[in-house]
Amino acid sequence: MPICMPGPMQIIVKVVPHAKKERVEATTEGLKVYINAPAIEGRANKKLIEVLAEHFKTKKYNIEIIAGQKTRKKIIEIRETH
């Protein structure tokens, strides 16, 4: 069942690149996302958006990295989903 949110949601995400298995874990700070892409030329950011879109059952265009483009700790905004 898709998640319905009234407006944008911002979450703190810590990215772990080069993971063997992709997964999303909840932490006390936000989310920890394991991805199998390297942190080179934006590949990890692209994969992060794909993994989060699948996790939140939304389209990729509803997810944006608003801070931390070049760091492992990022602030992600997820716009309204239906």
Image (cartoon, rainbow, N blue to C red):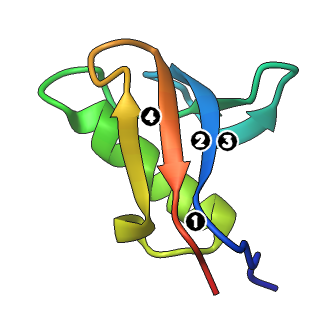
Q: Disc 4 versus disc 1: distance between alpha carbons?
A: 15 Å
Q: Position of residue 60 (x, y in %)?
A: 39, 66
What residue appears at the point 44 percent right and 22 percent down from the top-left corner? 17
Label 3 amino acid?
Arg
How many residues crowd around disc 2 within 10 Å: few (fewer than 14), some, or many (20 or more)?
some
Residue for badge 1: 54
Circles 4 and 1 in contact, beta carbons < 8 Å: no
**Nearest to the observer: residue 82 or residue 22:** 82
Where disc 1 sits, the SS reads helix
What residue appears at the point 29 percent right and 24 percent down from the top-left corner? 69
Residue for badge 4: 36
Quadrant holding the C terminus: bottom right
Answer with left or right where residue 11 lies relative to residue 64. Answer: right
Q: Quadrant of residue 21?
A: top right
Label 4 amino acid?
Asn
**Nearest to the observer: residue 14 or residue 17:** 14
Give the mark nearest the N terminus, 3 or 4: 3
Residue for badge 3: 23
Label 1 amino acid?
Glu
The mark closer to the camera, 2 or 1, is 1
